Image (spheres, coloured by chain):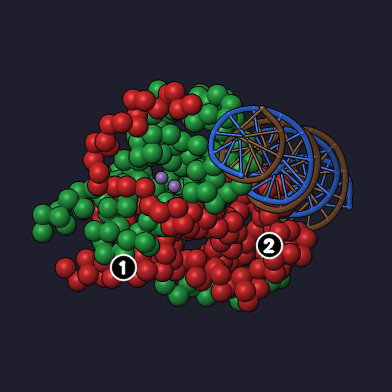
Chain colours: A green, B red, C blue, D brown
Amino acid sequence: MTDSNSQASSSAPSIPGDALPPVEQHAVQYATVRNAHETELIEDYVELIGDLLKHRGEARAADIANRMAVSQATVSKMIRRLNELELVTSKPYRSLFLTEAGQKMAETSRARHDIVLHFLRALGVKDSTARIDAEGMEHHVSDETLAIMQRFTEQQQNS
Amino acid sequence: MTDSNSQASSSAPSIPGDALPPVEQHAVQYATVRNAHETELIEDYVELIGDLLKHRGEARAADIANRMAVSQATVSKMIRRLNELELVTSKPYRSLFLTEAGQKMAETSRARHDIVLHFLRALGVKDSTARIDAEGMEHHVSDETLAIMQRFTEQQQNS
DNA sequence: CATAATTGTTAGCCAAGGCTAAACTGTTTG
DNA sequence: CAAACAGTTTAGCCTTGGCTAACAATTATG
Ligand SMILES: [Mn+2]
Ligand SMILES: [Mn+2]
Ligand SMILES: [Mn+2]
Ligand SMILES: [Mn+2]
């Protein structure tokens, strides 16, 4: 009894240009995004800790809370997770430090973040917008796209 | 007692180019991303339902589960939420439909998704990668950047 | 038309990532 | 050096978005 699809199913779609992708491919799209979301926040923390260490010499939980606009309790809980993941080391009430694995992740994330940010600026997006967009986009850009973005930015600079 | 920052704090950063943004601006970056994450999944559902209605004439929970690679229970729960948000209407065991608000959201999301996808292809990213990247990126692209992407794609086509 | 297969729902579990309130530690300062 | 202040942690709560298992309804088929 498909009593309600009578009007919609008969007429052809207005523009045949973009059909639905095959189910498997479509599923990969969504699964990849869900996957990225699992590591996204961790990458942002590690990247920020790396930046604080480089630019400030220390990374305090309070700084992270302020920069992320999140409560100190939230940061504290996350630091426990990062510890369990062996990305940071921390003695109670002291500055944080990155493990080897943490430093590696921080560098990778920072590099990717910078490529996206510089690309957006090269495209003509104004700095404050580019920073906001890059913060979210960075986690969803494949290596292939990243390489293309980097080339684009370089060519723009040698205009 | 900053006993451990001795090596890190003294030497200047290798490249002074990218300093930390001011705290307030930095906080806006992260908060905007958190915000996008709240609506992201809802947009994907509504968009997919709209696409299924357009291309298939009906939108069944099982189709959504298959396309999203997620259990039927997960879809069922989400549909309850979409109902509460008055984005979809559904009678049990029947196809889903979009409310006015749902249709509006579907169109907006679809348009944005397409702009990002077409932009990536215009940049030179291969289709399968572009689809994956667009699925995640779309939720983090500002109107400003979106407009620039659209212009870029058009110019590329009138090459 | 009875039964099998498909589809949908419900219940109950879990982890992640937020929050507030309260307790605790470390630092500054009168 | 005692108190006040700033920073950190813990406890306990909430929502979101997954899952599996069990059950219910619909649809297809022998
Ligand atoms: Mn980043
Ligand atoms: Mn980020
Ligand atoms: Mn989309
Ligand atoms: Mn999406």
Q: Could you say which quadrant of the image residue D9 lies in?
A: top right
Residue toward you, B6 or A12 = B6
Which corner quadrant holds the C terminus of chain B? Answer: bottom left
Mark number, residue A16: none
Residue toward you, A114 or B19 = B19
N-terminal-most mark, 1 or 2: 2
Q: Position of residue B13 (x, y in %)?
A: 27, 37
Is disc 1 surrounded by few (<14), some (14 to 19) or many (20+) residues within 10 Å? Answer: some
Q: Chain of mark 1?
A: B
SS label for mark 1: helix
Q: Could you say which quadrant of the image residue B104 lies in?
A: bottom right
Q: Position of residue B112 (x, y in %)?
A: 43, 66
**Identity of the amino acid at label 2?**
Leu
Q: Position of residue B142 (x, y in %)?
A: 42, 64
One can see residue B10 in this view = yes
Q: Count numbered badges in the picture.
A: 2
Is disc 2 surrounded by few (<14), some (14 to 19) or many (20+) residues within 10 Å? Answer: some
Residue under pointer 2: B82
Residue toward you, B154 or C30 = C30
Residue under pointer 1: B148
In the image, taking residue A36 as reference, residue B70 lies left or right, namely right
Q: Nearer the viewer, mark 1 or mark 2?
A: 1
In the image, taking residue B91 as reference, residue B146 lies left or right, namely left
Residue toward you, B156 or A106 = A106
**Identity of the amino acid at label 1?**
Ile
One can see residue B137 in this view = no
Q: CA distance from mark 1 to mark 2?
A: 32 Å
In the image, taking residue A63 as reference, residue A128 lies left or right, namely left
Q: Residue furthest left?
A: A159
